[in-house]
Image (cartoon, rainbow, N blue to C red):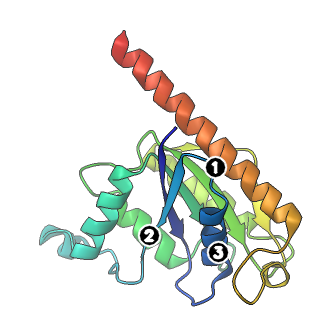
Amino acid sequence: MSIRVLAIGGSLRQGSYNHLLLEQAQRQTPEGMRIEIAELSDVPLYNSDVQAQGFPEPVRRLAAQAAQADAFLIATPEYNYSIPGVLKNAIDWLSRVPEAPFQGKPVAIASASMSGLGGVRAQYHLRQVLIYLDVMPLNKPELFVSAAHEKFAADGRLTDEATREGLDKLLAALAARTLRLRAGEAVAVAA
């Protein structure tokens, strides 16, 4: 099993709980899985006039990472009952590159929030946004990290055992879905 996962965090804040969750996912990856975290801080706001001049280098970099990925892991905070603009912006750019890097690939979604709901509304909205991209979202298990400020140590490590187990289950499900899709493609090609 060799699975490349592109992890996309929905926050640019230093010490973001969602970024820390992605870093924890890197530490907990199942054997044969590699997680690379995308950098979004230099991706410009989507503008079709800019696109008409050619895709900016940060977008080309992100698109290349996405095209090489077998699967995606998205961790998003909840801003005003929805996903942050930085995440929507990255998705908007990636939806316009010719490679269609999301199409047919599995996507696992997680969210971390200081609230008691753990970003549940943002995840629901993100699922709506992803429909157009023709992804294969994991419906279960779900991972909502509520009271995230109480679940990470000062060094950024996740200390909450139940959340670590939930992350393990999410990553295992992402690996299994990716391998099933890969096997289905192999059967289709052989036929």
Q: Secondary structure at mark 3?
A: helix
- Residue name at image x 54 percent, y 49 percent: 33
Q: Position of residue 20 (x, y in %)?
A: 65, 77
Drawn side of residue 44 relative to residue 12, left or right? left
Q: Secondary structure at mark 2?
A: loop
Nearer to us of marks 3 and 1 is 1
Tell me, for residue 30, which label it has, or none: 1
Residue under numbered circle 3: 18
Q: Earlier in the sequence, mark 1 or mark 2?
A: 1
Q: Amino acid at mark 2?
A: Ala
**Quarter holding residue 151:** bottom right
**Quarter holding residue 154:** bottom right
Q: Earlier in the sequence, mark 2 or mark 3?
A: 3
Drawn side of residue 185 relative to residue 77, left or right? left
Tell me, for residue 38, which label it has, or none: 2
Q: Position of residue 131 (x, y in %)?
A: 52, 48
Q: Secondary structure at mark 1?
A: loop
- Residue name at image x 77 percent, y 64 percent: 144
Tell me, for residue 138, which label it has, or none: none
Q: In this view of the protein, can residue 46 be seen by the observer?
A: yes
Label 3, residues with CA under 10 Å away: few <14, some 14-19, many ≥20:
many
Q: Gap between marks 2 and 3, in whole Å?
A: 13 Å
**Quarter holding residue 191:** top left
Nearer to us of marks 1 and 2 is 1
Q: Earlier in the sequence, mark 3 or mark 1?
A: 3
Q: Amino acid at mark 1?
A: Pro
Q: Are marks 2 and 3 in contact (CB under 8 Å)?
A: no
Q: Gap between marks 3 and 1, in whole Å?
A: 19 Å
Label 2, residues with CA under 10 Å away: few <14, some 14-19, many ≥20:
some
